[in-house]
């Protein structure tokens, strides 16, 4: 939060709260590098955040802007807010005084001069074009705009790495970066976004475009580093390096080459930064971030978690099952696995440890459940909207296709934690420890905004219109609850949305740079030809290769960026193998998502380990094991289209039943417990074979899987239970 009163005072429990466990789940976590302003700076940031969110609502619903102009303002606004809020270096501690490296302020003051000068030049360019100038003098763009802009941008970025101040203090180097962001956007709006943009990629392109694009790319990467870490930045730098070293590489990586001017004159077009990723972040994602902020402001997240406790808390290992339900719901909306772990895991992980789960398992369950929220329809953490934008497949078709895979994933995680609880003889939580279901069911209307969203989408409303209706309904529904949203709460929701959007916008823009490299160098097409050559020997080997590349590209990256990059590199090759576009993109999407729980770089698992106190690598291995179904089911898309609703009703029903039984057997094999008893190694191997046969979906394989399951049942019946636990799933 920018405001000190929001993050320090979570909602207190009411005197008669019926044992409500969740309070403050909706409170936004404050990152360690976010500034906490006071006084007039706080008010200025609040106003800017509200204005940024309101601008998007106005443009999307009332007065649409020209597409490229809208995307340019969208990215620039996120950069301005980001540089205001997120520092480029650590804050000083109380013992260190008010500042370290005071020389950075003096150098930044010098850099203000070229930054202000470039900003003045953009106004000058506007005047010249308004007066009828058809082409700006190259020397004016080079020496009076380009080089000063690059000098100010590069200098301020480097200075920001050393500029350490108090948490409430603003940074002068970041003010330089804000001015450079405005100057870059102003150039694109006033010069580039005219008939001159038709010349991009040719020798006739104005030289200023390349300078502005280089500065803009550097600003986006620096902001991505601050809000999402180095992983995506490193990958983007590698791709950028490929543009210029590619002509000297051997084999399929070699390509004819692009000059600096030709590449950067195109990278800030709809082939790159302003392409599909920013198109989605500036429309669907920002809208659903605002929707999520309204849900948070009305305390719906608290209700989701308390409702989950009331429903599942009494069953054995109850808090783990609560984590599955609550984290799936919250993760679907907020669109980030690690962020969801922080919000719901702070409550569920300690409770899981209390009923007997180890630190590693408690963190792993939360990480797996939060990651699963990214594949849960109808929102799918915004992934469904990016997939619709890239493939052209209607959103409703994608949401429907995602139903069975999501059921299989969450069923698998549920069975995993239930078998773990049975094996360890765990109890559920007592009734006097849980919220009262009778009380919560009276507030079931709080699910209305999500129901309205789904109904509106399937009635044929546009995604923007449906999202806006759902957002308005969140306000109306709040008036029936104890947390009524007035003007102050609505403004707070808009402020919250502006802050929440910074990370995803920066990530999408940075991913756009990578997508631009892929499309402009043709490396995606060459990767497709490589997949085809592998498939000539083994189609399964080609799929495994595609899986590994998708996971590698997704490691350390938020879901949206991971999928956008993998969809550009891997999905076209799968389509050329003859796989349906929907199946190919779901295959890539799943593995981009589960990279968040795949060792060695598993962001969701690491976030959970930070809360549970467990070893990060052990937690990531445990979450990988719990989410194992997500690594198997995508391969079945290829062999059984019914799993994506691409079959008759009877075939879909059979696929759902047999695959669910398959993940039940898979969970037993992984946990070493099924049919009331611990399973020895041979039984676990039989269970694994039976599970794979059941998930595969053919009649013959289903019957063979059932036969093996019957064999394991009778083998287990001969063994005495290790604990006096109840049979089956609680």
Image (cartoon, rainbow, N blue to C red):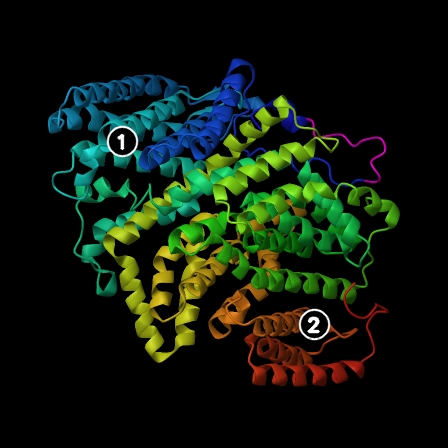
Give the number of the disc on residue 312: none
Res 537 → quadrant: bottom left
In which image quadrant can residue 114 be found?
top left
Left or right for 3, reference 639: right
Crowding at dot 1, Cα within 10 Å, few <14 / some 14-19 / many 20+, comes out as: many
Q: CA distance from mark 1 to mark 2?
A: 60 Å
Which residue position is annotated with label 2?
A: 672
Image vertical order of residue 458 relative to residue 658, above or below = above
Confirm whether residue 678 shows in the render: yes
Q: Which residues are magenta?
A: 9-19
| Nearer to us in this view, 11 or 609 | 11
Dominant secondary structure (helix, strand or loop) of the stretch shown in magenta: loop
Q: Residue at x 61, y 44 (%)?
A: 452
Is residue 482 toward the left or the right of residue 230 in the image? Answer: right
Mark 1 residue element: helix
Q: Is residue 508 left or right of residue 357?
A: left
Residue at figure coordinates x 37%, y 25% from the top left = 178
Membership of 140 in magenta stretch: no
The outermost residue toward the front is: 459
Tell me what residue is drawn at x 87 percent, y 49 percent.
431
Quadrant placement of the C terminus: bottom right
**Quadrant of the snapshot with the N terminus:** top right
Circle 2: element type: loop
Count of marks, rendered view:
2
Of the residues under marks 1 and 2, which one precedes in the sequence?
1
Residue 197: x, y in percent? Answer: 21, 37
Q: Which mark is residue 188?
A: 1
Task: Specify whether residue 557 is in view.
Answer: no
Query: Residue 219 in the image: x percent, y percent?
Result: 35, 34
For this orientation, the residue located farthest to the top is 40
Q: Nearer the viewer, residue 65 or 688?
A: 65
């Amino acid at each position: 939060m920018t405001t000190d009163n929001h993050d320090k005072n979570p909602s207190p429990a009411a005197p008669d709260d019926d044992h409500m466990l969740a309070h403050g789940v909706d409170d936004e976590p404050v990152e360690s590098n976010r500034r906490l302003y006071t006084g007039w700076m706080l008010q200025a940031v609040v106003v800017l955040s509200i204005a940024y969110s309101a601008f998007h609502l106005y443009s999307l619903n009332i007065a649409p802007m020209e597409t490229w102009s809208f995307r340019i303002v969208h990215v620039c606004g996120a950069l301005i807010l980001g540089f205001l809020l997120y520092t480029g270096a650590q804050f000083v501690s109380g013992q260190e005084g008010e500042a370290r490296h005071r020389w950075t302020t003096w150098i930044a003051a010098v850099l203000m001069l070229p930054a202000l000068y470039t900003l003045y030049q953009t106004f000058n360019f506007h005047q010249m074009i308004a007066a009828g100038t058809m082409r700006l003098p190259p020397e004016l763009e080079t020496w009076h705009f380009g080089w000063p802009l690059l000098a100010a941008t590069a200098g301020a970025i480097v200075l920001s790495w050393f500029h350490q101040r108090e948490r409430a203090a603003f940074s002068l180097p970041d003010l330089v970066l804000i001015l450079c962001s405005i100057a870059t956007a102003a150039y694109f709006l006033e010069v580039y976004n005219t008939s001159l943009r038709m010349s991009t990629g040719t020798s006739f392109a104005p030289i200023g475009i390349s300078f502005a694009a280089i500065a803009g790319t550097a600003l986006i990467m620096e902001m991505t580093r601050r809000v999402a870490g180095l992983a995506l930045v490193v990958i983007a730098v590698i791709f950028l390096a490929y543009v210029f070293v590619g002509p000297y590489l051997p084999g399929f990586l070699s390509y004819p080459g692009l000059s600096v001017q030709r590449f950067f004159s195109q990278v800030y077009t709809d082939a790159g930064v302003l392409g599909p990723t920013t198109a989605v972040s500036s429309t669907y994602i920002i809208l659903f971030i605002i929707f999520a902020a309204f849900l948070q402001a009305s305390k719906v997240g608290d209700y989701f978690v308390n409702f989950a406790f009331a429903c599942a808390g009494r069953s054995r290992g109850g808090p783990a099952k609560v984590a599955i339900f609550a984290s799936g719901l919250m993760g679907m909306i907020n669109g980030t696995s690690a962020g969801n772990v922080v919000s719901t895991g702070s409550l569920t992980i300690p409770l899981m440890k209390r009923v007997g789960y180890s630190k590693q398992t408690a963190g792993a369950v939360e990480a797996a459940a939060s990651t699963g929220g990214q594949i849960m329809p109808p929102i799918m953490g915004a992934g469904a909207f990016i997939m619709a934008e890239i493939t052209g497949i209607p959103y409703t078709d994608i949401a429907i296709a995602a139903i069975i895979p999501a059921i299989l994933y969450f069923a698998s995680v549920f069975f995993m934690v239930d078998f773990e609880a049975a094996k360890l003889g765990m109890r559920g939580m007592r009734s006097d420890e849980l919220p009262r279901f009778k009380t919560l069911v009276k507030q079931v209307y709080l699910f209305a905004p999500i129901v309205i969203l789904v109904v509106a989408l399937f009635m044929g409303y546009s995604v923007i219109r449906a999202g806006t209706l759902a957002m308005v309904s969140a306000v109306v529904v709040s008036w029936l609850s104890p947390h009524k949203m007035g003007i102050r709460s609505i403004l707070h929701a808009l402020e919250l949305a502006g802050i929440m959007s910074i990370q995803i916008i920066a990530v999408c823009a940075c991913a756009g740079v990578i997508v631009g490299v892929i499309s402009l160098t043709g490396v995606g097409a060459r990767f497709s030809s490589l997949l085809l050559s592998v498939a000539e020997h083994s189609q399964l080997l080609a799929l495994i290769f595609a899986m590994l590349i998708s996971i590698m590209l997704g490691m350390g990256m938020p879901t949206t960026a991971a999928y956008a990059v993998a969809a550009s590199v891997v999905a076209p090759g799968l389509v050329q193998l003859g796989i349906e576009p929907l199946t190919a993109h779901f295959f890539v999407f799943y593995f981009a998502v589960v990279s968040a729980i795949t060792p060695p770089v598993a962001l969701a698992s690491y976030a959970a380990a930070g809360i549970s106190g467990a070893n990060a690598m052990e937690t990531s291995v445990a979450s990988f094991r719990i989410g194992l179904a997500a690594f198997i089911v995508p391969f079945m898309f290829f062999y059984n289209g019914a799993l994506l609703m691409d079959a008759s009703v009877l075939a879909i029903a059979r696929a759902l039943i047999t695959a669910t039984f398959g993940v039940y057997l898979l969970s037993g094999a992984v946990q070493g417990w099924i049919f009331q008893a611990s399973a020895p190694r041979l039984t676990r191997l039989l269970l694994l074979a039976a599970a794979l046969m059941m998930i595969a979906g053919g009649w013959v394989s289903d019957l063979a899987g059932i036969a093996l399951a019957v064999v394991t049942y009778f083998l287990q019946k001969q063994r005495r239970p290790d604990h006096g636990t109840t049979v089956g799933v609680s």
